[in-house]
Image (cartoon, rainbow, N blue to C red):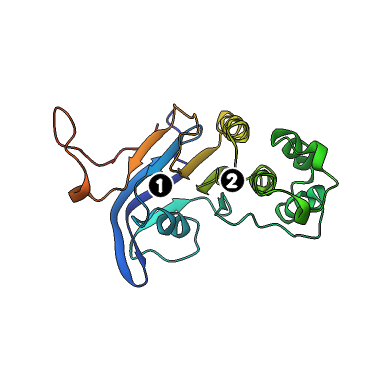
Amino acid sequence: MTMAPLISVVDLAVARGGVAILEGVHFALSAGRALVLRGPNGCGKTTLLRTIAGLQPPLAGHIEAMPDSIAYASHADGLKATLSVTENLRFWAAIYGQPKRVDPALAAMNLDALAARAAMSLSAGQKRRLGLARLLVTGRPVWVLDEPTVSLDAASVALFAAALRAHLATGGAALIATHIDIGLDEAAVLDLTPLKARAPAAGGAGGGFDEAFA
């Protein structure tokens, strides 16, 4: 029996500053699947993700997902500066009702040695790892990620990719806007570059993306 997608986006149109910047976006993500958004700065990746996360209304189309199933991570790390690493994660875990996820999140993002450190004393990369660790304490199946690897070195990118694979392996899904290769070769790619700006593909014209992941 085919499982229903965790999230479906149908003919979605989104706007920035009242001006439509993306139209006709259509995809679905089932458990275990990831989709990477590509495109130049300003093409609408962040606006699309914010709309899918429920932070702004779409111009047209609709998004289908179970209530409280989406965890959104933006460029901001969302940390409380005076709290320790552990206290930050406990705070978010309490909000999501997932207290048992704190220790695994610390381990997954290599934060154990920093557990007692105040967030304000962390480096940019360490703060980013802590910000991403928040995803692991939400318990939500759909991760919507806007440039998640900003400020991360190569080792930390690999650490995050491992955490992402573990999320997919346990029935989660992920939608990711990123300019770098995070080593998730199994992910599909949706190119948001305006069609008129794309170079013709070898052997034929470039196309869009319009399929559901089964």
The reply to whether dot 1 and dot 2 touch (C-beta < 8 Å) is no
Q: Amino acid at mark 1?
A: Ser
Q: Which corner quadrant holds the N terminus?
A: top left
Label 1 belongs to which residue? 8
Q: Residue furthest left?
A: 204
Please identify the quarter of the rendering in which residue 133 is found: top right
Mark 2, Cα crowd under 10 Å, few <14 / some 14-19 / many 20+, is: some
- If you read the primary sequence from the N terminus, does the residue marked by circle 1 or circle 2 appear first? 1
x and y, in percent, of residue 60 in the image = 32, 63
Picture quarter with the C terminus: top left
Q: Residue at x 70, y 34 (%)?
A: 108
Q: Say whether residue 29 is visible.
A: no
Question: Where is residue 23 shown, x and y percent of the image?
Answer: 28, 57
- Quarter holding residue 83: bottom right
Measured as percent of width and height from the top left, residue 167 is found at: 59, 34
On the image, numbered disc 2 is attached to which residue?
A: 151
Q: For the residue marked with disc 2, what is the amino acid?
A: Ser
* Residue depicted at 59% across the width and 46% down the height: 151
Q: Secondary structure at mark 1?
A: strand
Above or below for 96 versus 114: below
**Observer-nearest residue: 168 or 161?**
161
Q: Viewer-nearest of labels 1 and 2?
A: 2
